[in-house]
Image: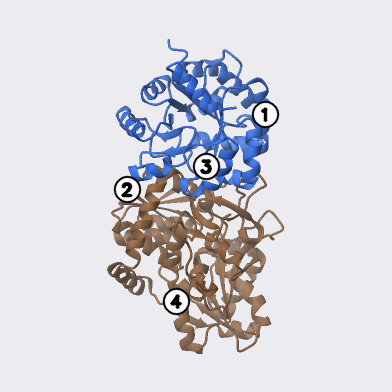
Amino acid sequence: MTNRIDNTFSVLKEKNRKALITFVTVGDPSIEDTHKIMNLLVDAGVDIIELGIPFSDPIADGTTIQSASQRALANGTTLKSILSLVTRFRKNNKHTPIVLMGYYNPVFRHGIESFCSDATNAGVDGLIIVDLPPEEDSLLRTIANKDDLHLVRLVTPTTDEERLSIILDGATGFLYYVSINGITGMQVIDEKTIEERINFLRQKTDLPIAVGFGIKSSEDVRMIQKYADAAVVGSALVKKIEEIGEFHKEGELFNFVRDLSETHVP
Amino acid sequence: MTISDTYHHQPDENGHFGEFGGRYIPETLMPLVLDLNKHYRKLKDDKEFNRLISYYSQHYIGRPSPLYFAERLTNHFDGAKLYFKRDELNHTGAHKINNALGQVLLAKHMGKTRIIAETGAGQHGVATATICALLDLPCFIYMGESDMERQSPNVFRMKLLGAEVIPVSHGSKTLKDAMNEAMRDWVTNVENTYYVIGTVAGPHPFPEMVRDFQKIIGIEVKEQILAAENKLPDAMVAAIGGGSNAIGLFYDFLNDTSVKLYGVEAGGKGINTDEHAASLSGGEPGVLHGSHSYLLQDDDGQIADAYSISAGLDYPGIGPEHAYLQSIGRVNYVAISDEEALSAFQLCCRLEGIIPALEPSHALAYVSQLAPSMKQDEIIVMNMCGRGDKDIFNVAKHLGFEI
């Protein structure tokens, strides 16, 4: 079976569509709510789901995701409970790609080999480990790739050409362009810079390019999708989840996500 | 390469001390850290840079610090001869300023215009604020709210020195959270900001660089002990939080394998309880704040809160070089409880007229166990890495005094 991430991007390309990726912190407000939210996201038109593994010391995250992580940990969310959530989700959904996003220590502590095989068996398709640069990821990458998991590499505004070639060497799945210098949920993004950077990246790679950090509204998503293959909405969604606290179909959260989705162009 | 000189061939070019160390940081920071590494390589053997360091070390910090024969404690322990390396006599009262001087000079050389740092007890914050005042650079210190309460005199010191102290209200509101917040600042202000890490932790080259700025301690000791005793010490003892004063004392002696080295971690209320800060004695390997080392953590890889009576030791990690030195058996790591440290603190005040910081009080408590087991012609050197003025309120509280 081909990896669901590859599959999704190639199907979208055929339809000449761009992807919407959404990030939620697992276990905020509870694991069961995350399950409901995942189904809601798919119904609202989300193409790829990023599941945040909560970590006690999230150095790349702003206050929104920090607080969500703390709530999730206080609820007893663990890597095991996250993987079992994915297993349950997969019973009724065989096609939506799932990417686990988080920090290295929980993965390291779980044991890299058993983590990769457990994740694959649960139905995970990719990993983003924010504090694991290419220089340190060869162990995880080798084992992940053997298990048909993509280890997604990140590119930032500080990446120069020399660095980019290191990042692209061994990159699979898609490339995640971090749109701003900073932490999640911060400043406004600048369209001209995005255009320039994406064009630059296109010259160097055929991988699909996703853009994340600082994308808050359907306008932002549309703008990103003009240039990139996918837009990632994280903090804005996590904030909505915190505010709304109720996740039934056709409710406020559903409407928020449906507006972000390209399938729903008004 | 023989075994004995491998000690001075660490880390490798990617910052690995054996399996430990490395660079585990967000991609946004990678270009900066690589650039920092390049600048540091160029500067570390630069004549003018080293002239500036030794000029300020001598005339501003007051180096070399004395090596003092602690005669009354020696008689009291009735065993080995005890010497204190008096790094508490440095300007600002601890070894921290050796590192702050080196890094802020480096930042200035790199053209950085804004300095940030984290602090726990406040000693590293005060040292950084001091050098920033000296070298005219704006300085922002991240400090956990709990630590700000525990160490209010140091908060005021930093303010007097012109630094802005930024309270950190996330997580446990202590040192690790201050470090998280400093890293977030750095990721956000990549162009103009230099992050002065206070101990031998963080991504490469920090553990190596901080060690290099602290190794002057051991270099001086070697010269001083040879002058005083005409031989090397038999044992050396230093307290360990992140591990900068210990590596500073040990480094020049790593190849002298006749010298036994002891790193003393904070055992808090006991390493079998949840309340301690002994990452090596009571932790597991893991990755935090940019490097692979030993950490206090739960089974799911979440970082645990460290605890110690000493705010300077309650960090849940430890420098990667210490993890390496433990793995090869070159340094012995032991733990001392709050109680034992408090007794040593009082003993040192009464017998030597030196009020030690709570950090070296842990080292002295271990000396009190070690010295009696050694012969009278054997020598122990202990790093008196900080003075205790900052701790008197805390100690008074624990001893039941109101001041």
> Could you say where residue A265 lies in the image, as x and y percent from the top left?
43, 12
Q: Nearer the viewer, residue A141 or B55?
A: A141
- How far, Cα to Cα, is label 4 from label 2? 34 Å
Disc number lying in front (3 or 1): 1
Q: The disc labelled 2 sits on which kind of residue?
A: Asn
Q: Secondary structure at mark 2?
A: loop
Drawn side of residue B226 relative to residue B400, left or right: left
- How far, Cα to Cα, is label 3 from label 4? 38 Å
Q: Secondary structure at mark 4?
A: helix
Which residue is under mark 2?
Answer: B192
Which residue is under mark 4?
Answer: B219
Q: The disc labelled 1 sits on which kind of residue?
A: Thr
Drawn side of residue A76 relative to residue B137, left or right: right
Other residues around mark 4 within 10 Å, as few (<14) / some (14–19) / many (≥20): some
> Could you say where residue B350 lies in the image, as x and y percent from the top left?
59, 78
Which residue is under mark 3?
Answer: A58
Other residues around mark 3 within 10 Å, as few (<14) / some (14–19) / many (≥20): many
Disc number lying in front (1 or 2): 1
Q: Nearer the viewer, residue A22 or A92?
A: A92
Both marks 2 and 3 on one chain: no
Give the residue displayed 43% in from the left and 22% down from the top: A217
Both marks 4 and 1 on one chain: no
Q: Secondary structure at mark 3?
A: loop
